[in-house]
Amino acid sequence: MKRPLSLYLHIPYCVRKCAYCDFLSFSCKGKEEETGLYIRRLNAEIKEAAGRYDDRQVISIFIGGGTPSVIRAEYIAELLDNIRSNYRLETDAEISMEANPGTVDREKLKIYRAAGINRLSIGCQSVNEDELKNLGRIHDFKDFVKTYETARDTGFDNINVDLMAGLPGSDMKKLAKSLRTVAEMDPEHLSVYDLIIEEGTPFCERYGKNTGLLPDEDTDRSMYAMTAGILSEYGFNRYEISNYAKEGYECRHNLVYWERGDYLGLGLNAASCVDETRWKNTSDMRKYLEKNYITEEKESLDIKERRFEAMMLGLRLTKGVNIRDFTERYKADPRELYGEHIGKMKELSLLEDRGGYLRLTEKGLDLADAVIEGFMD
């Protein structure tokens, strides 16, 4: 098999920007002409990049944003046809797309399925109407249910649902309601992300200096533990700090990131890392439309940076870091390389060495950032 490569396509358009979001995205209202031009430029970039990767096999594609489902479904089909024409696509490649309630209907979903999308990620965030309104979502819970059921009816048998924890005014009861309500709908995958207050967002203006309106640290940890407990009742396995899957339905594309595989980002502001070299496309729409894609210089990662990334990303996975693979790839046994820090973390029952893996304990998962930070030294 040729060396694997994953593709990420960025669609920066939304109906409107959510109050907590700091991704590069903007409203598509009144931008039909620009949207068409953007897709043409993205198709051109896809084709131009292909020649550099004719020794690669594409194992996964992720179409994200923004809200990819807000644009014409035919554009999505066109992008995927372009990839098939110019890249070697693995027969059973995972092809995922993000979709939000209120932006899709039966006809769009049929086009997605016909185009080869085999994994849908639906943004629900909460089943509680007050939380949805506060987040600035364009949909209510009934809209989510309709989208989910229509996706099932049109043949999607691999669906992820996004939820958020740690919301303003939230409590254990509200989160439990969201978790149980969605889990009972029986998706294959659930992502439950903790709210992060990002600079420059409306949420930062509202809550940045009023953190008392957010769940405190102890409550946040209790929510995290409760999430794992509730979802395990429904057959979901936590395989990454924020991600839960039924057996065999882990997100293959995201595993590429966590296991430091090669990925090529295409589109506005899309990031890439191939052969230990990282770069990013321009975030300036005008420049992108002029086909001036890359503005950041390519950065080659040295061995120290590679090793740290392998620990940082690998420890997010509940299975942890494979000691043998790390040693072969980075020419050092992590237990010797980071012996002092690992020893301290073991003494604190935050890290364990089991079955050939270094991994966070249950206690360590609660304090993951602090444990991982120690590998920077």
Image (spheres, rainbow, N blue to C red):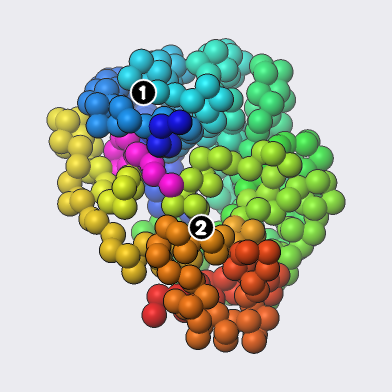
Determine if the magenta segment contains residue 77.
no
Q: Which mark is residue 136?
A: none
Query: What secondary structure is found at the residue carrying circle 1?
Result: loop
Magenta span: chief secondary structure: loop
Q: For residue 371, say whether it is visible.
A: yes
233 w.r.t. 66: above or below: below
Q: Which residue is mark 1?
A: 87
Task: Please indicate whether residue 30 sits to the left or right of residue 97 in the image.
Answer: left
In the image, 292: left or right of 19? left
First reached walking from the N terminus: tag 1 or tag 2: 1
As displayed, is residue 364 above or below residue 140?
below
Q: Amino acid at mark 1?
A: Tyr
- Residue at the disc numbered 2: 325
Q: Look at label 2 and name its amino acid.
A: Asp
Quarter of the figure with the N terminus: top left
Q: Depth check: 138 or 234 in front?
A: 234
Crowd tier of the residue under label 2, counting other residues whose Cα lies within 10 Å: few below 14, some 14–19, many 20 or above: few
Which range is magenta? 261-270
Q: Secondary structure at mark 2?
A: helix
Q: Please tell me which residue lies in front, 136 or 359.
A: 359
Q: Residue furthest right?
A: 233
Q: Name the image quarter holding residue 77.
A: top left
